[in-house]
Amino acid sequence: MSEPRSLDPEAGRARTKRAPFPFTEEQASRPRLPFMRRPFMKRSMVQLTLVRFREFIREPEAVFWTFIFPILLAAGLGIAFRQRGPDKVQVGVVTGFAGSGAVVQSLARDSTLVVTTYDDSAAALALRTGKVALLVVPGSAKDSVRYVYDRGRSEAINARLMVDRAVQTGAGRVDAVRATDTYVTEAGSRYIDFLIPGLLGMNLMGSSIWGLGFSIVTARSKKLLKRLMATPMSRAQYLLSYLCSRLVFLILEVVTLVGFGHWAFGVPLRGSLATLFLICLLAAVSFGGLGLLTASRARTTEAVSGIMNFIMLPMWIFSGVFFSSANFPHAVQPFIKLLPLTAVNDALRANMLEGASFAAVTPKMLVILVWGVVTFFAALKLFRWR
């Protein structure tokens, strides 16, 4: 029977100093075996990345929002805003005047105008409800006319110029200078050409932030992170595995959306494909860092959803996804240019539509890279397992 252990703390500390490791002298004197490197597929980073990959594949909703939804959105907007020629302008002519018939005949000759006749009360209602952009009121004399429109509507200003041209031409005005037209169609100037790079940037941001953030918070809420905390895995390895899994799907996302735009709508790819992929790679890392940062402390999906919306909503509005960010006032342009999605969209459009070189998009890529590095290390510092 072994002797009872002493409860004296000093004795325990002395024992620890004499034998810091649980080896006998004979065991310690034996030659140690060389360090055996584990196969590549058995390494912790590879296994963690494969876990992220399997989690994504097993969620049909994630696959739909990452690959199918951007294509459906691009197809719908591309068809809605396809090149259809100029829109016809709706104008109204008030009847009951001596010159109403002549005015209607003059306007009907212009194929860009859609003319509708109204009496006084119906004409006022049509203008107020936006059915027509402009009302033409013939004067009491045959050689006079009055235009009624809202100067705050840009289409009303254009309608006024077009209607006056048709009225004056119908009255016998002859142009002093002879003009001819040459029509061209240039890929890169259409709305769909502007839209595809914006959708690509938005998809990279959404799949990175939502995909990574929700996965981490869900694992935390289910106490899975608490179990992983007991393993030799470090938090850096755990967070890097999410970034690595994002890179696996990056090629599929880029090829799917850009390939669809190029094949279905003829969106040009004038720049280097290597530069395009590098921009997308940096974008995935940058937005992945944002996703990790949003999930570093949140405990519930409701909380992380609010944080993500708070981060992404300004970029959806200001970063030029569906319309140019130049529409905003000059005073806020420096702030807009510092947003990561703005830098991504500008770099993608410069590469795809303008054929910009690597050096030309380097400043924008530096902005993307800084966001990625800062957010990842901030997430590493703030991350908690519980």
Image: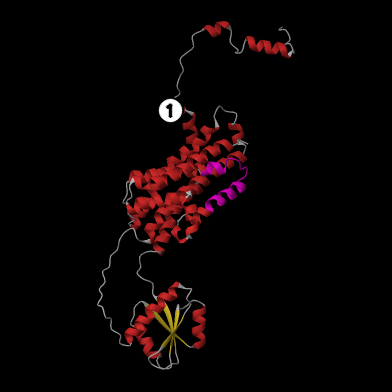
- Residue at 41 percent across and 52 percent down: it is 346
The residue positioned farthest toward the front in the image shown: 331
Q: Is residue 72 magenta?
A: no
Percent of width and height locating residue 177: 26, 78
Tell whether 28 sits left or right of 345: right
Query: Which secondary structure type mostly characterizes the magenta part of the structure?
Result: helix
Residue 252 appears anywhere in the view: no
| Vertical comparison of 252 with 129: above or below | above
The residue positioned farthest toward the top in the image shown: 26
Residue type pointed to by label 1: Phe
**Which residues make up the magenta segment?**
290-313
Q: Which residue is mark 1?
A: 40
| Vertical comparison of 152 with 324: above or below | below
Residue 228 appears anywhere in the view: yes
Tell whether 332 sits left or right of 230: left
Q: Is residue 305 magenta?
A: yes
Percent of width and height locating residue 30: 51, 7
